[in-house]
Amino acid sequence: MSPSSPSPPSLPVSTSQAAVGAAGASPQSVDLTNWFLDAKRSLASVALCARANSLVDSARGALQEAAIISSKCLFLRNALQDQLLVALRVSRMMHSVREASKSDFEKIVADLDNADARLNQTLGVLRKSVVDPAFNPPSNSEGEESTPTAARPRTLHDFVDDEGIENLKSRLRHLIDQVQESHDALLTSLTEFSGDISELDTAINNLTEFASNNAQGGRITSESIRPQIHALEEQAGAMAGLLEALTQHYDRCCEALKQSEPTTNHNQEGGMMGMAESMSPEEKQEMYRVLEKDALEVDDVVTELKERYNEMENIQLHVLGQLEELNMLRHNTYATFALFEQFQVNLGSYVERMREFETQQEGYARGMEDRLDELWQLGGFYEGFISAYDAMVIEVGRRKGISVRMETIIRDAMKKLQALYDDDLADREAFKEERGHLLPVDIWPGVMDPPIRYSVVKDTNGASELPGISKGVIEQALARQQQQGKGGM
């Protein structure tokens, strides 16, 4: 027997091949007895082999359990990674919606700024546009004190509805604040969503890292345990070989003891006496020598059995340690899956907030577009007001021109009428001198009447007098109108 050899030792079997019944010198009975007792005690190692087989069976069970746990964890981990990718796409979609809404908001704010700047520029022109004093209402005939507003020159801005403009701008500011608040609320929600995704991603990465590397730096799977199972099976096989060698040694010791017994009855023990008598002294000596050699190796074989069993126990501890790590991986995987279930609940609220945000933005956009239209219309209205004032000044000039032409025509007509009247009066007087005394008074009562006199009376028809605007003011208004026609204000 050779305890240092990796394969089970093979005891010599020369004695089993020799005849055991020959007469001659017998081995020393004391040595044979001691060898027999040592061999019998060594067979107690069969308990180690039984425990070794139990270790192998336990390890195989651990391998099956590890395969189940590893498959479940891998399936759940892959499912979690797939769901994480979906969550990342949802997050990118939400951020895209916010960015698009933010871009639309910034665009309409820029349009509002342009419309407001146009309105403010127009209002500035109105403040600088002094109303010609000729348009001022007549002074109070009762001599009441004039107000400070009446004391200063009037401008076109005095006719602006400042309260209406401020109300419009106030509504716009309120809308802009609401939009900004909704964007801030969504950003907070998206930040929380990103935090949840990051937490889930970290948990999944930890799972992957834990699954890839155990405490010894190897991958934790059922395959990582399989080589150790093979090592246990090899150790158990080697122990079985060693135990078989011990058993064979024990059998040879028993046989040698029988050979050493005296043989006188030819009928006893089934003919063994004849076999013993057939063994020569040299053969008995060779059997003794082999038994002596094997007896020296018994203790080493028993020690090797114990060492191999201890090694199997160490391997078993390592297997159980890896199985424990797999159970820990399963626990962590379930915990991560529970975290994902809570994440799904939160995801529903995030999606609902996004839908609410989109609905809000649609309403805000409509409101801001309406206010933008009002702002542009106000700017256009007051630009038209400036142009209308100049047109009014020009209209006054036109009316004054018509009035002058009408007065000229009237003066010319009155001169012609007066000349006709004078001619008619002179002719009537000459007729009365020449023929009047010959006509009876009652023949035509109107024969002595004077000519009919015509007069032109101005009928204002309730209209006021035209303002006394100077020619220079009218010419300035005409120049501004011509400039507007070329594209300027």
Image: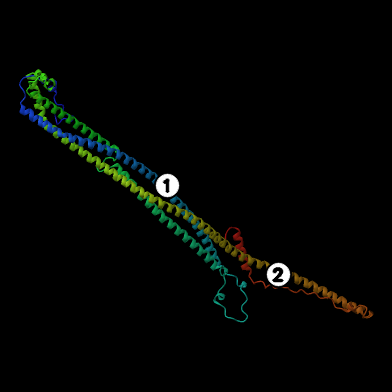
In this rendering, position of residue 386 left or right of residue 446: left
Q: Which mark is residue 89?
A: 1
Residue at which label 2 appears: 403
Instruction: Give the amino acid at mark 2.
Output: Ser
Instruction: Give the amino acid at mark 1.
Output: Arg
Residue nearest the observer in this picture, 467 or 218: 218
Q: Is residue 206 visible?
A: no
- Point out the frontmost of discs 2 and 1: 1
- Quarter of the image holding residue 487? bottom right
- Quarter of the image holding residue 403? bottom right
Q: Is residue 194 visible?
A: yes
Q: Secondary structure at mark 1?
A: helix
Q: Secondary structure at mark 2?
A: helix
In this rendering, position of residue 415 left or right of residue 337: right
Label 1: how many Cα within 10 Å (few below 14, some 14–19, many 20+): few
If you read the primary sequence from the N terminus, does the residue marked by circle 2 or circle 1 appear first?
1
In this rendering, position of residue 447 left or right of residue 16: right
Residue nearest the observer in this picture, 380 or 459: 380
Residue nearest the observer in this picture, 42 or 261: 261
Q: Residue at x 8, y 29 (%)?
A: 33
C-alpha gap between disc 2 and disc 1: 80 Å
Label 2: how many Cα within 10 Å (few below 14, some 14–19, many 20+): few
In this rendering, position of residue 442 left or right of residue 452: right
Q: Residue at x 10, y 31 (%)?
A: 37
Looking at the figure, which quarter contains the C terminus?
Answer: bottom right
